[in-house]
Image (cartoon, rainbow, N blue to C red):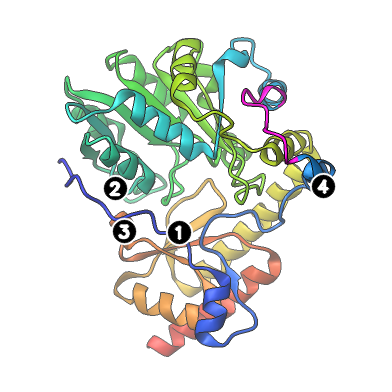
Amino acid sequence: MANKTSTSSYQPGRNINDIQKLYGLQKVIKLASNENPLGPSKKAISAANKIVQSINRYPDSKSIDLKSAILKNISKRNISASNIIIGNGSNEILELVARKYLNNKSEVLFCKHSFLVYKIISNTMKAKIVESKPIKEKGKDFMGIDLVSMKSKITNKTKVIFIANPGNPTGTIVSIGEIEKFIKNISKKIIIVLDEAYYEYSSHYGFKSAVNLLGKYKNVVVTRSFSKIYALAGIRVGYGLASKDIISDFDKIRQPFNVNYIAQKMAVASLGDERYLEKSLRLNDAGMQFLKSELNKLGITYLNTYTNFITLYLGSKTQEIYEILLSEGVILRPLENYGLPDYLRVTIGTKEENNMFIRKLKKSLKVIK
């Protein structure tokens, strides 16, 4: 079914300072935006400090050093610098896809409850939005992408398909094997965007990236972000991987100097800090296990997740619980604008933050009984 062409603008998580002022609180924790609670790598901070006096100069428009670091990190024979584009966050890469391939005569396809930016950028290009159905059968894939439903929605007007893997706000995942079967059986004229903003978390659970598909399929675009596990959300940097022709087309329409000097240097340093990556994954693992255990004790169900967040089902009490938690200094993410009014999303925080969230959640559940 096609959606209306209008949608509300992207609503970020509530601001800590605003909640402190609103409720007169000193202690407020934000578990709404899937940020790494560790903060950036010390190597990344050091890299930023070294160059801060040089920001009177324009950055490298081609981001050569960052592309080299990405190549070293990926270490795939079929990938070269000409297969990489650096963006002002991976959102910019998604926007370049829309600008290049969508117009008022085309259709764009993604699963219902997908990352809201897909809808926003598609509306900007006046494309017809088509949403496939998520998996409704209870089980580990519940609310994940149903590729059979997605394939059934393809028409001769479909120009772009967005697949977040893992998904946001659901946290669910599709195996690369299933995705490749899907790609094999649809038109090669359709651009398939595989959004891997949470890839580092899912790879920790044994899931493979779509990067391996780039050598086989010239219509595939893979996007990655430094905002999540690398904790660089505040400086905006991400990248896209695709065929040389697609990257060349993107380079023609992107803004010059689109990624700032400090962002490039911090991203390079982050990719070189394996200990930081391991520490982040350990913290996420411990927090995930703790929260799932506590939620199970409380009888609260949640979607299966391969990310750094959990999406909780709270039913008709969702909004009330959200507001009580806000008043107690815990910011979660309501999902009404994703078509999920009965769910809240919680980011895995530090041990202290996770404990505080559970304490306040227990309190809110007692209040609404």
Alpha-carbon distance for marks 4 and 2?
51 Å
Identify residue type, mark 2.
Glu
Residue that carries the numbered disc 1 in the rendered image: 12
Q: Earlier in the sequence, mark 3 or mark 2?
A: 2
Identify residue type, mark 1.
Pro
Tell me the element at label 4.
Answer: helix
Left or right relative to 58: residue 109:
left
Q: Earlier in the sequence, mark 4 or mark 1?
A: 1
- Mark 3 vs mark 4, foreground winner is 4
The picture quadrant where one finds residue 278 is top right
**Residue 320: image x %, image y %?**
36, 79
Where are the magenta residues, as a range? Answer: 55-65
* Vertical placement of residue 346 versus 182, above or below: below
Residue that carries the numbered disc 3 in the rendered image: 337
- The answer to whether the residue labelled 3 contacts the one labelled 4, judged by CB atoms less than 8 Å apart, is no
Q: Earlier in the sequence, mark 4 or mark 2?
A: 4
Q: Main secondary structure of the magenta part?
A: loop
Residue that carries the numbered disc 2 in the rendered image: 137
What residue lies at 43% left-to-right and 89% top-to-bottom? 367
26 in the magenta segment: no
Report crowding for label 1: few under 14, some 14 to 19, many 20 or more residues within 10 A (C-alpha).
Answer: few
Alpha-carbon distance for marks 3 and 4?
39 Å
**Residue 44: image x %, image y %?**
77, 43
What residue lies at 36% left-to-right and 72% top-to-bottom? 318
Alpha-carbon distance for marks 3 and 2?
23 Å
Tell me the element at label 1.
Answer: loop
What residue lies at 58% left-to-right and 64% top-to-bottom? 291
Q: Which mark is residue 49?
A: 4
* Vertical placement of residue 22 versus 40, above or below: below
